[in-house]
Amino acid sequence: MRTCSSVGCINPQGGIVNDPIAIKLTENDWWLSIADTDVMLWAQGLAIGFNLDVSVTEPDVWPVAVQGPKAEDLMARVFGESVRDIKFFNIKPMLYQGVAMQVARSGWSKQGGFEIYVNDASLAGPLWDELFAKGDDLNVGPGCPNLIERVESGLLSLGNDMGYDTTPFECGLNQYVNLDADVNSLSLPALRKLVPTQQLMGLVIDQECTFTQLNVTANGEQVGEITTHAFSPKYGVHLAFVLCSLPALGDEVSLDVHTQLGLLKGQLTTLPFNFKSLDLTPKPRT
């Protein structure tokens, strides 16, 4: 069974260009399932700069995500019971109307699910209709990334929480970087030398609020900026991601947030949020 992995596309200064999923189809055929920026010119630039004997193209493939706690049951109805055997971040070809499509257990959700790499445009409509028809009793519906779930789960968004001005180490993506890798790389020399000057952290405010500005302060001095936030009805707190200046932050563990209620205190924490250690439990549903 093929595997796929989250990777980082890093520029020569150590900044994040993209955080795609890399899929190895064969020894000589790879896909990058990219986030919200284009990487075509970046990849072509690497190919030319390193004089690689490769062809950089954009395949006629369109990912469809089937996410949620009932995703596996729906996928089994459409692709057969063997889809249940796909492990997390594994991918394998599954037949749909006689056409092999790559199916991965992955997706931008902590609820679990699958991504179908549709490679035949004529089957896109029938597949969509069948997913809805066979998922009618599962309450299937069209969707998009849910901001509240994204924040609760600590899932980062390229262009909001990270980008050219942040390194993987500054936004908690350390596990995807091997500084000891013996590869010809434009970015590793920079990453080996860089000392982080900022850090993406979590912030917890004990009530729902509306921010009047995104700057956060400590003792009247700006120490960071909120990149993403949402009120969590599940835990009854307002959650935020904050890109903090490490020199300005010092040893502070709480910050002042500017809201329509005035200055409110927020508790700093690591990402992803550890609600148990924060002594937060789900609220009863009403």
Image (cartoon, helix red, strand yellow):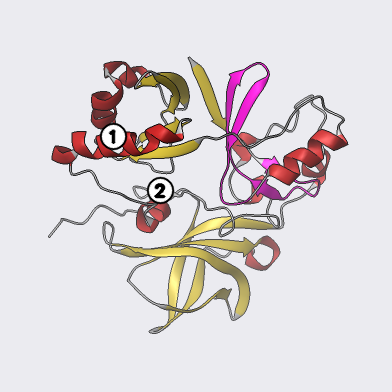
Q: Amino acid at mark 2?
A: Ser
Q: Position of residue 50 (x, y in %)?
A: 86, 32
Q: Position of residue 9 (x, y in %)?
A: 68, 41
**Res 64 → quadrant:** top left
Most extreme residue toward the front is 122
Residue holding disc 1: 71
Q: Is residue 2 left or right of residue 281?
A: right
For residue 164: magenta?
no
Q: Quadrant of the C terminus?
A: bottom left
Q: Amino acid at mark 1?
A: Ala
Q: Circle 1 sits in a helix, a strand or a loop, which is it?
A: helix
Asked if the residue under mark 1 is in contact with the one under mark 2, i.e. CB atoms within 8 Å, the reply is no
Residue extent of the magenta highlight: 9-37
Nearest the camera: 160 or 81?
81
The residue carrying pointer 2 sits among few (fewer than 14), some (14 to 19) or many (20 or more) residues within 10 Å by Cα, namely some
Q: Residue at x 61, y 63 (%)?
A: 244
For residue 22: magenta?
yes
Residue holding disc 2: 153
Residue 70 vertical position relative to residue 163 in the rendered view, above or below: above
Q: Position of residue 168 (x, y in %)?
A: 65, 45
Q: Circle 2 sits in a helix, a strand or a loop, which is it?
A: helix
